[in-house]
């Protein structure tokens, strides 16, 4: 150093002394000397092979320490910062006396943040003024201040000043509460914080390690730090710096480990983590008397922090060269000119919310989520700008001149095409008008009106027939899904020869049997629960928009089948045997073993042929879902077998996301025994079970039981039909001293049958004299027990018929309350009992006998006695009579019918109120949604599929089950079917695609 530099340094030193004195305004303490390193040839501060190591000693203190080594310190600092050593960093005036400890903190003005940026000039005089013990250590953090917007983490200056101060207030800001950091408190890389487990320190710990401790730690860091890492010691922390590989050096990453164990991390001078404690790698504090093992652990943990930081890669940003010219046009971005000399990119467009750190994985490009979105936006904008043709709906103000010209040319061409089309259509219309004038025939007004109201299904059918008939080659025909369903329906109703004869006639164009086979066999034939159908139903239910549409009813019934075997070529199996589970097979073997012990004969029971098919249909309460999902071939059904199979089906449906809320069956003995096997939630005085816990559902919702109302209607009619006096009559119903007899119905019919105008117009020979076929029809039973018949009997004023009229009216209203088919049926028929249910306090619930228990009085009081109370009083009156138990039972409805009525009313009210009290309740619920009619419709299709044989076998039932799943509900109902499911509204046209069998080609 020449004389000029010496004089300049001396002048700067004196100026700094005067500024410090004027700033503090207090008397300076007497100097006792300064710390002196053991080796005078080693300067203060750096632990890198190219830099010297900082060594302090508290036993040798001399006042001339700074004068001897100040030049070495300045030269050392110049290697790190790139500044000239002659500018000076430390002077003798910047030192104060400290007995045995060294501590570091920020300047008083910068205590709120360790990375606050000093906006003062960077000259040597201004950087030294106001410094305390060791002055300002300036570390250059190269930021692109021209391109990056100013923020709290990156401001106007590019140098971070770390000032030395011994005040207690400086350390107090480093420690706050011990609560984990929220996302808003974390730096951009939230992923790194969650990985390291960063939390605020629990208490304020002030650590002042000895000089020997700092000396030892610097030596350890020198040996343990990875390549390209160096260390700087300040008053309160160690700065672990990762320098660029190029020259001049730049600090790319920095890990600042404080003496109290907290850690701060900087990436490109951006604060990533501020004075946090790492739960997974807690750094112990360095105290004055720290043991060597604590010092070693401090260093090891600090090096581990460095390794954790090195596990992450620097985000390369949106470094897409093709979009470089539009980087400036993207919002929330800045252009990174790579002042930190990262090797992965030269220049990049970086998001203002960039994470900077990306977890190292097997990727070609390391880019954070925000920068990936920026890259996508850049590419979209580049494609838009460079494309010749833009979207036709894009406003012209956003288009380039070339795109505007292209758009105008396309619109001109489209306009010419449309003008030609209009002129062609006008020509065709004129031809049609001329032809009508020449060949047209005048028709009457009513005929013209009828022609204008052709059904949509007929219009669709004619359109498809014309379209397919025009194609000469059958291979070029493309069939509409609705027409395929219609063809499948025709094929299920007729034999194969009849269907082929209809196609060969040429009057109608239909798909061939081979094409229909691919659709009818798209799903495999399976005994028990059909997994293919179940998956199909689950997919449809999952697409329903409302949560309440996922609730369904489960319908159960049997159909008799012919006992024979059919070979199934798809899986090389014989279909026709009864299907037993493992327990039932073991019980059968056990019975054979017991029989062998008692009889002495080795009798082995073989598997028997199935006689019935136990079918389960799932039906949506508030949706159009209606599929047979299971069919079990059985020889003899009992309640135990029904219990196992019913809950097996419910479990499969619940797993598939299909919620079962009500179970509907008829009044067969096995069904009644099955329901009695359950533990009820609500106990009744009569002991009727109508609800239980659905243990297959996650929320343990209730499962309600109902007996089919249509079957109940027929059993009530049968009880009245068998009531009377005579040998053939098995019942004599009596209430309030009056007998209810069928002969009054016959008398009414015979009295008015010859009249052209009569009130009881519904009575006819089929319902008055029912045979074994007509007695199965629900319609005939409802016609007899109707309001018109009760009104006609009342007008006749025959003695002893008052209670008969009252009974018929009760049964008619009961059937109407549980038989509403659609939401406007009450308005069309002017019968309010058919209205949908919208309120849990509906007055019909009070009339049925299930009022809302939360109300002390009925919401709609009525003078009429509730239906269940009417039946209960009738039963009590019969029990009070001095007659035998058999005669008492004959005086009222059958016990099975009474149980079914009570179970149906309470089960219906229970599941309707449950659905209406959901968080997202339906607008209304139709009563017929719990009817068994859809399953009866399915059985009619099964019987009709056999042609003249109305008793199909097991294989035919299973194949028809799959076929009906494909063709769904096409809205065509037999007029002679035993149900009232739908009116005759014709086919339902839908474009829903059909599943088709995949063709498998054999490989030789």
Image (cartoon, rainbow, N blue to C red):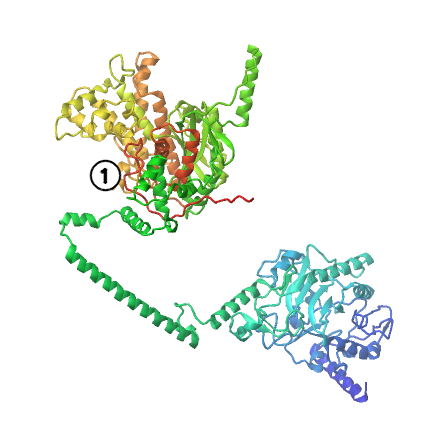
Whether residue 393 sits left or right of residue 432 in the image: it is: right
Whether residue 509 sits left or right of residue 169 in the image: it is: left
Classify residue 243 by image quadrant. Answer: bottom right
Q: Quarter holding the C terminus?
A: top right
- Against 831, residue 59 (above or below) is below
Give x and y (percent) for residue 986: 29, 42
Between 372 and 21, the one nearer to me in the picture:
372
Mark 1 residue element: helix
Q: Who's the residue at 61% across and 72% down the image?
A: 154
Between 200 and 248, the one nearer to me in the picture:
248
Between 518 and 265, the one nearer to me in the picture:
518
Q: Who's the residue at 80% across and 75% down the image?
A: 30
Give x and y (percent) for residue 122: 68, 80
Give x and y (percent) for residue 220: 81, 63
Residue 236 visible within the image: no
Residue 774 visible within the image: yes
Between 313 and 527, the one nearer to me in the picture:
527
Classify residue 362 by image quadrant. Answer: bottom right
Give x and y (percent) for residue 229: 75, 67
* Mark 1 neighbour density, 10 Å: few (under 14) some (14–19) many (20 or more): few
Q: Who's the residue at 52% across and 74% down the image?
A: 326
Whether residue 809 sits left or right of residue 213 in the image: it is: left
Q: Quarter holding the N terminus?
A: bottom right
Q: Which residue is mark 1?
A: 829
Whether residue 812 sits left or right of residue 295 in the image: it is: left
* Badge count: 1
- Against 531, residue 197 (above or below) is below
Classify residue 927 by image quadrant. Answer: top left
User: Which residue is situated farthest in the top direction here?
Assistant: 599
């Amino acid at each position: 150093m020449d004389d000029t530099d010496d004089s300049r340094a001396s002048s700067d030193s004196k100026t700094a002394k005067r500024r410090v004195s004027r700033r503090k305004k207090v008397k300076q303490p007497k100097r006792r000397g300064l710390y002196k390193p053991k080796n005078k040839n080693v300067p203060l501060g750096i632990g890198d092979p190219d830099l010297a190591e900082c060594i302090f000693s508290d036993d040798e203190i001399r006042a001339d320490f700074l004068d001897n080594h100040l030049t070495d310190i300045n030269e050392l600092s110049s290697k790190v910062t790139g500044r000239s050593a002659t500018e000076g960093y430390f002077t003798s005036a910047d030192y104060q006396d400290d007995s045995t400890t060294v501590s570091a903190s920020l300047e008083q003005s910068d205590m709120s943040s360790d990375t606050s940026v000093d906006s003062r000039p960077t000259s040597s005089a201004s950087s030294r003024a106001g410094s305390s013990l060791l002055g300002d250590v300036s570390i250059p953090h190269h930021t692109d201040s021209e391109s990056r917007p100013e923020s709290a983490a990156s401001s106007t200056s590019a140098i971070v000043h770390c000032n030395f101060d011994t005040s207690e207030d400086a350390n107090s800001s480093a420690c706050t509460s011990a609560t984990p950091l929220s996302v808003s408190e974390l730096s951009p890389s939230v992923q790194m914080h969650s990985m390291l487990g960063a939390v605020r320190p629990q208490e304020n710990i002030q650590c002042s390690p000895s000089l020997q401790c700092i000396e030892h730690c610097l030596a350890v860091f020198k040996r343990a730090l990875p390549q390209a890492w160096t260390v700087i010691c300040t008053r309160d922390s160690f700065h672990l710096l990762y320098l660029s590989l190029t020259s001049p050096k730049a600090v790319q990453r920095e890990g600042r480990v404080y003496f109290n164990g907290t850690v701060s991390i900087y990436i490109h001078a951006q604060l990533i983590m501020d004075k946090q404690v790492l739960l997974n790698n807690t750094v112990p504090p360095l105290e004055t008397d720290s043991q060597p093992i604590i010092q070693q652990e401090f260093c090891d943990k600090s090096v581990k922090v460095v390794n954790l930081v090195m596990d992450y890669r620097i985000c390369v940003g949106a470094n897409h060269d093709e979009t470089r010219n539009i980087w400036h046009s993207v919002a929330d971005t800045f252009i990174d000119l790579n002042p930190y000399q990262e090797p992965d990119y030269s220049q990049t467009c970086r998001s203002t919310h960039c994470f900077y750190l990306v977890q190292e994985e097997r990727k070609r490009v390391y880019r954070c989520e925000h920068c990936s979105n920026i890259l996508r936006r850049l590419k979209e904008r580049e494609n838009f700008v460079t494309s010749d043709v833009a979207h036709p709906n894009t406003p012209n103000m956003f288009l380039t001149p070339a795109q505007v010209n292209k758009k105008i040319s396309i619109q001109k061409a489209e306009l010419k095409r449309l003008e030609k089309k209009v002129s062609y259509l006008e020509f065709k219309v004129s031809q049609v008008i001329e032809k009508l004038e020449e060949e047209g025939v005048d028709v009457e007004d009513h005929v013209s009106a009828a022609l204008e109201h052709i059904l949509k299904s007929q219009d669709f059918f004619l359109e498809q027939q014309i379209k397919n008939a025009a194609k000469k080659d059958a291979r070029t025909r493309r069939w509409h899904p609705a027409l395929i369903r219609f063809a499948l329906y025709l094929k299920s109703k007729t034999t194969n020869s009849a269907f082929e004869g209809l196609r060969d006639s040429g009057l109608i164009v239909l798909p061939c049997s081979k094409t229909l086979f691919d659709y009818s066999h798209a799903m495999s034939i399976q005994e028990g629960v059909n997994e293919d159908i179940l998956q199909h139903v689950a997919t449809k239910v999952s697409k329903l928009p409302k949560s309440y549409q996922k609730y369904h009813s489960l319908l159960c019934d049997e159909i008799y089948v012919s006992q024979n075997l059919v070979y199934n070529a798809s899986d090389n199996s014989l279909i026709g045997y009864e299907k037993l589970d493992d327990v039932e097979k073991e019980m059968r073997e056990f019975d054979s073993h017991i029989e062998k012990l008692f009889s002495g004969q080795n009798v082995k029971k073989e598997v028997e042929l199935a006689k019935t098919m136990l079918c389960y249909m799932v039906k949506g309460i508030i949706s159009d879902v209606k599929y047979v999902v299971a069919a079990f071939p059985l020889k003899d059904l009992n309640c135990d077998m029904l219990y196992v199979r019913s809950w097996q089906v419910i479990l499969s449906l619940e797993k598939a996301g299909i919620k079962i809320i009500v179970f509907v069956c008829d009044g067969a003995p096995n069904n009644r025994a099955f329901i009695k096997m359950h533990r009820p939630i609500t106990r009744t005085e009569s002991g009727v079970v109508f609800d239980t816990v659905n243990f297959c559902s996650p929320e343990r919702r209730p499962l309600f039981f109902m007996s089919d109302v249509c079957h109940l209607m027929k059993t009530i009619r049968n009880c009245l039909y068998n009531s009377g006096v005579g040998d053939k009559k098995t019942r004599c119903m009596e209430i309030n001293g009056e007998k209810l007899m069928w002969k009054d119905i016959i008398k009414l019919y015979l009295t008015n049958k010859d009249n052209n105008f009569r009130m009881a117009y519904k009575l006819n020979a089929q319902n008055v004299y029912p045979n074994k076929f007509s007695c199965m029809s629900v319609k005939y039973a409802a016609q007899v027990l109707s309001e018109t018949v009760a009104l006609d009997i009342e007008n006749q004023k025959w003695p002893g018929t008052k209670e008969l009229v009252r009974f018929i009216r009760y049964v008619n209203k009961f059937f109407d309350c549980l038989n509403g088919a659609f939401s406007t049926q009450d308005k069309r028929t002017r019968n309010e009992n058919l209205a949908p249910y919208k309120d849990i306090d509906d007055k019909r619930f009070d009339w049925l006998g299930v009022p809302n228990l939360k109300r002390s009085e009925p919401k709609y009081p009525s003078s009429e006695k509730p239906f269940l109370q009417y039946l209960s009083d009738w039963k009590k009156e019969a029990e009070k009579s001095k007659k035998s138990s058999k005669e008492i039972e004959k005086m009222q409805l059958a016990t099975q019918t009474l149980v079914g009525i009570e179970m149906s009313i309470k089960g219906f009210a229970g599941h309707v109120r449950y659905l209406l009290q959901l968080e997202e309740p339906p607008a209304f619920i139709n009563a017929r949604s719990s009817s068994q009619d859809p399953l009866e419709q399915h059985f009619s299709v099964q019987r009709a599929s056999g042609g003249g044989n109305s008793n199909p076998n097991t294989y035919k039932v299973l194949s028809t089950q799959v076929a009906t799943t494909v063709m769904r509900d096409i809205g065509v109902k037999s007029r002679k079917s035993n149900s009232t499911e739908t009116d005759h509204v014709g086919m339902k046209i839908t474009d829903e695609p059909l599943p088709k069998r995949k063709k498998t080609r054999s490989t030789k």
